[in-house]
């Protein structure tokens, strides 16, 4: 069982819809991440939150809007997506933002998003 | 440009034998390396890591070797078990940085 929980597991949405992806962790980790993974490609970083503040935005289009309501929750709000945004969206957390030998990323099982 | 490369997309090994998965990197500033295992419909699961001050780290059946001069790391699984069949990603970062750079993965199949 993963200690990072993502909902929903699957999501199909039209290009005019607004939807949200949710992520929750109860490990006391202070850094949370959104990654995007396309088929047969490695995960690519989208956003990093550290102590509930956005610290990294990897030039992600504004149709993706992250939110960190508290230290355990991370949301990704989606609006006016394109079919090419279809991918597996992975949430991860780590003990602290800065990577190091005591702070590996722990991933959720992801949300498989299809934009029609 | 891919900074972490896994040149073998797939590997098949007999149960009980050793599995060796390889990974190369180009950024000499990387000093922290990890291996993740991924089953279908699940997220990557952290397996083992190594920092650049070491050249070997062992955890049960899993051993990671780091060759800094060659910018190469490998994951050894011995003995291999059918439950090890999964996609394995290596990842690298610079200590204190915010991002992990992943390889494209190697699909390991352990044949009973």
Image (cartoon, coloured by chain):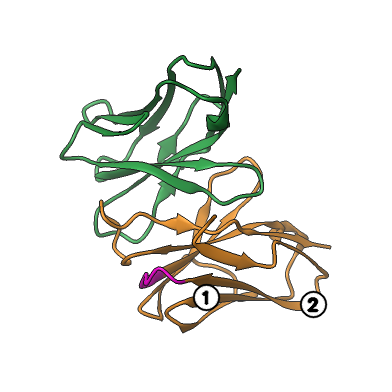
Q: Are marks 2 and 1 in contact (CB under 8 Å)?
A: no
Instruction: Give the image location of residue B83, x and y in percent.
Output: 56, 31
Displayed quadrant of residue B52: top left
Residue A54: in magenta span: no
Query: What segment carries the magenta color?
Result: A26-31
> CA separation, marks 2 and 1?
20 Å
Q: Which residue is mark 2?
A: A17
Query: Upstream in the sequence, badge 2 or badge 1?
Result: 2
For residue A53, what is the image quadrant? Answer: bottom left
Find residue A65 and report its horizontal and vertical position in percent.
58, 78
Tint of chain A? orange
Up the image or down, A93 lies above or below B102; here it is: below
x and y percent of residue A73 in the render?
51, 77
Residue corresponding to mark 1:
A74
Determine the secondary structure under disc 1: strand
**What type of secondary structure mainly makes up the magenta span?**
loop
Chain letter of the green region: B
Secondary structure beneath label 2? loop
Residue drawn where x is 49% and y is 61% of the image:
A3
């Amino acid at each position: 069982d993963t200690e990072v929980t993502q909902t929903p597991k699957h999501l199909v949405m039209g290009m005019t819809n607004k939807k949200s992806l949710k992520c929750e962790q109860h490990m006391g980790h202070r850094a949370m991440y959104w990654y995007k993974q396309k088929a047969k490609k490695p995960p690519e970083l989208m956003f990093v939150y550290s102590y509930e503040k956005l610290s990294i935005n990897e030039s992600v289009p504004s149709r993706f809007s992250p939110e960190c309501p508290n230290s355990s929750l991370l949301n990704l709000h989606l609006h006016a997506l394109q079919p090419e945004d279809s991918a597996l969206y992975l949430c991860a957390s780590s003990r602290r933002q800065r990577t190091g030998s005591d702070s590996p990323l722990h991933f959720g099982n992801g949300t498989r998003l299809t934009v029609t | 440009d891919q900074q972490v490369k896994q040149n073998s997309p797939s590997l098949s090994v007999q149960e009980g034998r050793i599995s060796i998965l390889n990974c190369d990197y180009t950024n000499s500033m990387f000093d922290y390396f990890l291996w993740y295992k991924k089953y279908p419909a699940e997220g990557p699961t952290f397996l083992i890591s190594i920092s650049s001050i070491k050249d070997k780290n062992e955890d049960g059946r899993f051993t990671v070797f780091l060759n800094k001069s060659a910018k190469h790391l490998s994951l050894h699984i011995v003995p291999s078990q059918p439950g090890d069949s999964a996609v394995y990603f290596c990842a690298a970062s610079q200590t204190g940085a915010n991002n992990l750079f992943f390889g494209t993965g190697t699909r390991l199949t352990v044949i009973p």
